[in-house]
Image: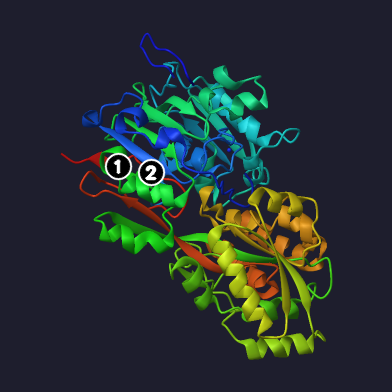
């Protein structure tokens, strides 16, 4: 929150990632003195370029904004957090890790001396307030869907102790708690939605606090002097500059004194050029996907043989080569191969136009003419044209409807009569557990499921039963087996399914900065970043 300390500081979404096609804003293009808001680089200041806008919701329990979610990993804490680098859980606001994650009641002591960045203590009331927000059925937030089926309540025991009750054992509970960020009741209780969403009002207990922010331009951070937790940031301040234009973003990295030291969202086709200019560029395998969703409310797309035929008619390797410079892999499961929950699906969609033709013939389909709806992101435009060519080779005519992302989202929400959608998405922003990543797409609350009506089918009912069995088991072995069966069913049905998973790239100046590791989600993690010299 923009506040003063006398003490002297002045102090986002949905399924398809919004790509804002605007030029680089002025605040990101001037000399160092104008882009650093008075910060002295020699004292440990880092400038960052972020390929997403900062003008969506900043409510940590109700946003899908790539910019805000990445920033909030630096300013908010959960009871148990996890580093976005390795996703290993650790005690954050909780004094220790839970002793028994299979128990239905967890008694949690808060970290001694934990304070908000306005100097007020973190209390059990703050935890109860935050949990109640997530579990409020009258006013659900984005994160409600990740907790309501298994988390019962949180009850204050004393000022520094909370009792958390689960409805049933939940094998992914510890991982899931990392997205339930604890918010200060004294700041947010009773406030309107737009207050929650405003970046200027954010106030956490984490290592950094927001110093200043300008929509579509920048957000700057300084250390929270009252932070006493387990993390040890090595820079004093940082500014994240909005740079949604890819060419401008990569230019910032190579422009010397007027540039930045690090950037996320590096286009795959610029990796070699940036490395040739002496920058360190590293990628991470991610769930970020190009996927297909079929309109199963209409024939012949309610026949899985047709869906399977269209899927195996796509030359995924060629598509990856032309659309993202080869920096990805054909999907062999709904989850990417680097996921800790990955298992190779029993149904594979290797390129096989002969078998695709055979399946269409078996389904009684010929001269198929369909509409393919897509966003106009540069690489997806290339991808859908490659798909159109591959479908033409098996006698299928695809009419492309390529639109702005906002228009795409509106069309889907309003039930556009398109036959097939291509989409990009990466629910790993919220977590890596298999249940979360599947239900992000396969839920009747999901926009695609409302659009294609598959949630009303007996096949979805069977899948939902498998997922519920997996999440309610108190045996990890049983959970893993049920989830594997669910992933196999998802592959077999091919209703909403990836064509490929992409690598995400981060670039930085290794002569100026170290301690950086690439993420498989949008944004950066600066907790270990250290300036050289």
Instruction: Return the residue nearer the eye: 327 or 182.
Output: 327
Q: Which mark is residue 132?
A: none
Instruction: Return the residue nearer the eye: 190 or 386.
Output: 386
Q: Which mark is residue 525?
A: 2
How many angstroms separate mark 2 from mark 1 (CA)? 8 Å
Instruction: Return the residue nearer the eye: 358 or 48.
Output: 48
Q: Position of residue 53 (x, y in %)?
A: 52, 40
Q: Which residue is mark 1?
A: 528
Q: Position of residue 382 (x, y in %)?
A: 56, 67
For the question of whether residue 419 can be seen, the reply is yes
Q: Position of residue 384 (x, y in %)?
A: 62, 68
Q: Name which residue lies at 44% across and 55% down.
A: 520
234 left or right of 147 in image: left
Q: Is residue 113 above or below residue 178?
A: above
Q: Name which residue lies at 45% across and 43% down.
A: 243
Q: Is residue 458 above or below residue 251?
A: below
Q: Position of residue 96 (x, y in %)?
A: 40, 36
248 left or right of 452 in image: left
For the question of whether residue 264 can be seen, the reply is no
Q: How is the image coloured?
A: rainbow
Q: Name which residue lies at 50% across and 46% down.
A: 174
> How many residues crowd mark 2 within 10 Å: few (<14), some (14–19), many (20+)?
many
408 left or right of 507 in image: right
Where disc 1 sits, the SS reads loop
Please say if the residues under marks 2 and 1 sit with CB atoms less than 8 Å apart: yes
Where disc 2 sits, the SS reads loop
307 left or right of 23 in image: right
* Image quarter in which the C terminus is found: top left
> Residue 449 is drawn in which quadrant?
bottom right
Q: Is residue 215 above or below residue 121?
A: below
Q: Residue furthest top?
A: 6
Q: Is residue 367 above or below residue 416?
A: below
């Amino acid at each position: 929150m923009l506040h003063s300390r006398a003490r002297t500081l002045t102090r986002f979404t949905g399924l398809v990632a919004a790509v804002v096609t605007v030029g680089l804003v002025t605040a990101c293009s001037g000399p160092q003195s104008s882009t650093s808001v008075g910060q002295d680089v020699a004292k440990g200041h880092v400038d960052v370029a972020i390929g997403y806008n900062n003008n969506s919701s900043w409510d940590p329990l109700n946003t899908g904004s790539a910019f805000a979610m990445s920033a909030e990993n630096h300013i908010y804490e959960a009871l148990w957090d996890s580093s976005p680098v390795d996703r290993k859980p650790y005690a954050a606001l909780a004094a220790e890790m839970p002793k028994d994650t299979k128990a239905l009641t967890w008694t949690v002591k808060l970290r001694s001396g934990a304070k908000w960045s306005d100097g007020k203590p973190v209390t059990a009331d703050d935890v109860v307030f935050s949990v109640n927000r997530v579990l409020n059925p009258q006013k659900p937030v984005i994160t409600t869907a990740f907790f309501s089926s298994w988390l019962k309540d949180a009850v204050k025991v004393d000022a520094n102790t909370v009792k958390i009750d689960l409805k049933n054992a939940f094998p992914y509970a510890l991982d899931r708690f990392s997205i339930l960020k604890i918010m200060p009741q004294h700041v947010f209780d009773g406030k309107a939605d737009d207050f929650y969403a405003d970046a200027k009002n954010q106030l956490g207990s984490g290592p950094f606090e927001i110093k200043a922010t300008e929509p579509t331009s920048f957000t700057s951070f300084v250390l929270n002097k009252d932070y006493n937790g387990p993390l040890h940031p090595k820079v004093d301040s940082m500014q994240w500059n909005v740079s949604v234009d890819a060419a401008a973003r990569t230019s910032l990295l190579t422009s010397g004194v007027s540039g930045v030291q690090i950037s996320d969202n590096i286009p795959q086709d610029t990796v070699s050029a940036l490395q040739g200019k002496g920058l360190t560029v590293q990628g991470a395998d991610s769930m970020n996907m190009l996927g297909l969703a079929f309109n199963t409310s209409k024939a012949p797309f309610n026949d899985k043989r047709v869906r399977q035929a269209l899927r195996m008619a796509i030359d995924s390797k060629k598509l990856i080569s032309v659309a993202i410079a080869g920096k990805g892999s054909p999907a062999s499961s709904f989850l990417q191969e680097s996921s800790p929950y990955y298992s190779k699906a029993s149904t594979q969609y290797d390129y096989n136009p002969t078998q695709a033709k055979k399946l269409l013939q078996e389904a009684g389909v010929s001269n198929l003419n369909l509409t393919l709806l897509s966003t106009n992101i540069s690489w997806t435009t290339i991808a859908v044209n490659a798909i159109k060519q591959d479908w033409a080779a098996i006698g299928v005519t695809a009419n492309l409807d390529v639109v702005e992302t906002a228009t795409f989202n509106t069309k889907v929400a309003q039930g556009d009569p398109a036959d097939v959608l291509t989409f990009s998405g990466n629910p790993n922003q919220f977590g890596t557990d298999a249940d979360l990543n599947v239900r992000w797409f396969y839920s009747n609350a999901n926009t695609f499921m409302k659009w294609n009506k598959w949630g009303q089918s007996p096949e979805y009912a069977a899948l939902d039963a498998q997922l519920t069995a997996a999440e309610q088991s108190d045996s990890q072995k049983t959970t893993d087996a049920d989830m594997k069966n669910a992933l196999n069913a998802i592959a077999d049905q091919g209703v909403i399914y990836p064509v490929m998973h992409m690598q995400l790239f981060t670039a930085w100046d290794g002569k100026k900065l170290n301690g950086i590791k690439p993420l498989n989600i949008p944004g950066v993690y600066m907790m270990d970043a250290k300036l050289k010299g």
